[in-house]
Image (tube, rainbow, N blue to C red):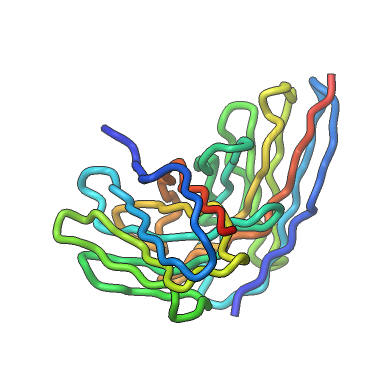
């Protein structure tokens, strides 16, 4: 089974721009969760999509949004980028969602905002 | 809400045993998962405790005490490749909350 893939792997953007990140889950998994990880910090939960519906949302501003397509692929969008948005963005897929004890993580997209 | 505490850093020597503790405050608790993340890599699942007691998987074991809201990950016969960050995660109803991670450094 192919693992979770994320594109692009690295991205450099300028403050004020917007960015779209993509995540393809493991085949058959209907849940995709997004996390932000900054140096020395844990994984901060952004949101979870299950069968094209946002099921859970973390404490992030409205500049962070996402969606999921019928093939379970998910995109995350950040508008009006700020320097503090520089981070590793991870997506994780599972069959059940956020209450799955095992989530499968992609390699992440490292976003640098200058 | 949910909160977790784990030590930020632990150092041990090759061949030793190390224990990484995790205490949590939460409602709607299902269990505790542990993940390993090497520098620059993706977190990978290590272990899960849904019931009190010890779960053993090779050199790694994980323990949970629901009454104490406490768990730990035990790594035995440490190897250099075990140098990584280790995260505990509280699994609840419709939500997983990760700790800030413990950086384990294994020295020769």
Asked whether, in this view, residue B2 is left or right of residue B74, the answer is left
Q: Residue furthest left?
A: A70
B7 sits left or right of A84 in the view: right
Give the image location of residue B84, x and y in percent: 68, 36
- Give the left or right position of residue B37, taking residue A72 as reference: right
Question: Which residue appears at 75% of the width and 46% of the height?
Answer: B20
Where residue A44 sits: x, y (%)? Answer: 56, 64
Q: Residue at x 79, y 52 (%)?
A: B8
Quarter of image, res A7:
top left
Residue A102 position within the rendered picture, expressed as x and y whole percent measured from the top left: 44, 49
Q: Nearer the viewer, residue B50 or B24?
A: B24
In this rendered view, identify the residue nearer to me: B70 or B37.
B37
Instruction: Choose top left, top right, bottom left or bottom right for residue B66.
Output: bottom right
Which corner quadrant holds the C terminus of chain B? Answer: top right
| Position above or below: B41 against B59 | below
Number of marks drawn: 0
């Amino acid at each position: 089974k192919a693992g979770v893939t994320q594109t692009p792997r690295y991205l450099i953007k300028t403050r004020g721009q917007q960015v779209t990140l993509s995540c393809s889950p493991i085949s058959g998994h209907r849940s995709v969760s997004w996390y932000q990880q900054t140096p020395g910090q844990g994984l901060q939960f952004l949101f979870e999509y299950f069968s094209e519906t946002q099921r859970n949302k973390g404490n992030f501003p409205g500049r962070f949004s996402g969606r999921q397509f019928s093939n379970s692929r998910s995109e995350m969008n950040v508008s009006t980028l700020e320097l503090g948005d520089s981070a590793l963005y991870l997506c994780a897929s599972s069959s059940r969602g956020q209450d799955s004890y095992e989530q499968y993580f992609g390699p992440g997209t490292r976003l640098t905002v200058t | 809400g949910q909160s977790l505490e784990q030590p930020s850093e632990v150092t041990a020597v090759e061949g030793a045993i190390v224990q990484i503790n995790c205490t949590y405050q939460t409602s709607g608790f299902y269990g505790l998962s542990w993940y390993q993340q090497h520098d620059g890599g993706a977190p990978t699942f290590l272990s899960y405790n849904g019931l009190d007691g010890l779960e053993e998987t090779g050199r790694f074991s994980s323990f949970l005490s629901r009454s104490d809201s406490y768990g730990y990950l035990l790594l035995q016969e440490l190897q250099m490749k075990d140098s990584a960050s280790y995260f505990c995660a509280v699994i609840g109803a419709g939500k997983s909350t990760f700790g800030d991670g413990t950086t384990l450094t294994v020295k020769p």
